[in-house]
């Protein structure tokens, strides 16, 4: 698989993880999100996928697209996976509401110019 195809696959996985977060949280308020264990776990898992896919994007591609916050996306995944006791769910909610929509738009824009994934 070429680097471009690997990057496209990772970007596609990132976009899918964001869509799943948005789909699962669409009917939740902040309070109900904070009070519901299963939705927090679903969101955590998708943030892990988002960060892991982000980590798989080549350095060259990341450097060519500095508009994406690659470093903090991976860092959030690392906190969720390795420092799970430090997860701030209010912060996750803010990211879902304020950061993910713009990130998804950027990823979708990138995907338009990338090869189709087999």
Image (spheres, grey):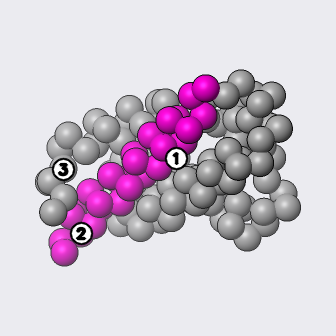
Query: What is the span of residues highlighted in magenta in the rendered image?
Result: 1-27
Q: Nearer the viewer, residue 23 or 90?
A: 23
Residue drawn at point x = 46 percent, y = 59 percent: 54
Could you say whether the residue bearing mark 1 is in a helix, strand or loop? loop
81 on left or right of 103: right
Give how far apart the Cα atoms at labels 1 and 3 are: 19 Å
Residue 1, picture quadrant: bottom left
Give how far apart the Cα atoms at labels 2 and 3 are: 11 Å
Q: Is residue 3 above or below residue 70?
A: below
Could you say whether the residue bearing mark 3 is in a helix, strand or loop? loop
**Can residue 113 be seen in the rendering of this structure?**
yes
Q: Quadrant of the C terminus?
A: bottom left
Residue 55 locus on image (x, y percent): 48, 65
Question: According to the image, label 2 marks what residue?
Answer: 3
117 on left or right of 99: left
Please tell me how crowded label 2 is: few (under 14), some (14-19), or many (20+) other residues with Cα within 10 Å. few
**Can residue 71 be seen in the rendering of this structure?**
no
Residue 118 covered by magenta stretch: no
Residue drawn at point x = 38 percent, y = 32 percent: 105
Circle on res. 114 = 3
Q: Are marks 1 and 3 in contact (CB under 8 Å)?
A: no
Q: Nearer the viewer, residue 21 or 88?
A: 21
Question: According to the image, label 1 marks what residue?
Answer: 69
Sequence-first tag of 2 and 3: 2
Could you say whether the residue bearing mark 2 is in a helix, strand or loop? helix
Sequence-first tag of 1 and 2: 2
Residue 34 locus on image (x, y percent): 80, 37
Residue 26 covered by magenta stretch: yes
């Amino acid at each position: 698989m070429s680097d471009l195809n690997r990057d496209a696959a990772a970007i596609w996985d990132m976009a899918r993880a964001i869509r799943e977060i948005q789909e699962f949280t669409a009917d939740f308020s902040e309070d109900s999100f904070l009070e519901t264990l299963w939705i927090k776990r679903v969101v955590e898992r998708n943030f892990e996928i988002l960060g892991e896919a982000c980590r798989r994007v080549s350095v060259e591609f990341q450097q060519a697209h500095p508009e994406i916050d690659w470093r903090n996306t991976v860092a959030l995944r690392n906190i969720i996976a390795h420092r799970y006791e430090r997860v701030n769910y209010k912060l996750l909610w803010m990211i879902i509401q304020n950061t993910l929509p713009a990130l998804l738009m950027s990823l979708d824009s990138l995907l338009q110019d990338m090869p189709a994934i087999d």
